[in-house]
Image (spheres, rainbow, N blue to C red):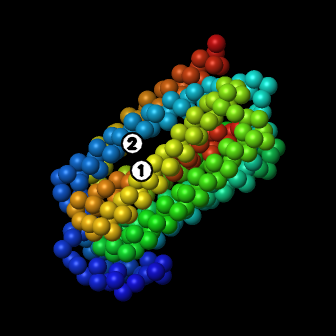
Amino acid sequence: MTTAHAEAANGTLPHEPEKATLEGRNKVLAFWLFLGGEAVLFGTLFATFLALRNQTNEGPSANELFHLPLVAAATFLLLVSSLTSVFAIQAMHRGRVTMLRNWLLVTVLLGLCFLVLEIYEFSVYIRHEEFGMTTSAFSSAFYTLVGFHGAHVAFGILWISVLIGQLMHKGLTVVTAPKIYVSAMYWHFIDVVWVFIFTVVYLLGKVG
Amino acid sequence: MATKQHSPDSPVKHRHRPEGPQRHIVVFVFSIVLTLIAFAAVAAGGVNPTFAVILLLVMAVLQVILQMGFWMHLKDKGHMMPIIFMLGGFFIAGTCIIMSLYWVWWD
């Protein structure tokens, strides 16, 4: 970690590099508008799911299907990854590029673990529970909502991985910093959506 | 490397001092506790369903407010427009959810 110190000594970067330029500030503001739109998108998927959650068409119901330990593990993975992306941004604000890269790598890795767990969950449902996309209105709504969230996680993993490459290639500048900051906002939002998913889909599914 | 994160902050408030990890860890612990309460209420079983629904939704909303406030910095100064964007999004999302539930329940 001797390199981290040398990078911190490079004091040319402003304190909050993501807000140092007008372009950076605009990116952050516009990304909030995008997240507002994402909230609407997931809202419609939640609305569909809530309307159709009891239409099981003689297929498995939520109560028969879901196993809480698996959901708890997925929740824990995503929550920890949200915390590590906070640490990444804090490292960025201190100008420690190596530490920033390492926290981003940990975040991506935890996201990958979450994705693997979700793919395993879906594959169990499809192969052993005969719960496919077309089994029932409930199954279609379930796979669309949870799958859409999983797709967001997959996109986030790709995005942050590319940013790690760019960070190594171009270094931490007022151009790369807003990109990293915005990707961390995205990742937090993914975790926020998951809070509603584990509550509304899994826990309320168990309650009935 | 992780130990470096725990260096104690000096009590002197400096305007441009980077914030420490402490309160983010506090938010993390609160999130874990809220999640545990929700999972425990369901795993224990025998909880009145109406009460369980209210409890679960309150736990979720509390956790979301905590994470958006601290981790996404919505509680900080200069976040009026982001808050308006997010509240606008949640308002439309909530309208969609209430409408579709209305269609299903009071058909």
Instruction: Look at the picture and state if A110 lies above or below B90.
Output: below
**In the picture provided, is B84 more to the left or to the right than B65?**
left
Mark identifier at residue A120? none
User: Where does residue B64 sit, x and y in percent of width and height?
Assistant: 50, 49
**In the picture provided, is B44 more to the left or to the right than A190?**
right
Instruction: Point out the residue furthest to the right here.
Output: B46
Residue, disc 2: A35
| Residue B6 visible to the viewer | no
User: Where does residue A110 sit, x and y in percent of width and height?
Assistant: 55, 61
Residue, disc 1: A186
Question: Considering the numbered disc 1 on the image, is that residue within a helix, a strand or a loop?
Answer: helix
Could you tell me the amino acid type at mark 1? Tyr
Q: Which quadrant: the N terminus of chain A?
A: bottom left
User: Where does residue A156 sit, x and y in percent of width and height?
Assistant: 45, 51
Q: Could you tell me if the residues under marks 2 and 1 are in contact, i.e. CB atoms within 8 Å?
A: yes
Gap between marks 2 and 1 measured at Cα: 8 Å
Instruction: Look at the picture and state if A26 lies above or below A9.
Output: above
| Chain at numbered mark 1 | A
* Residue at screen point 40% across, 69% down: A101
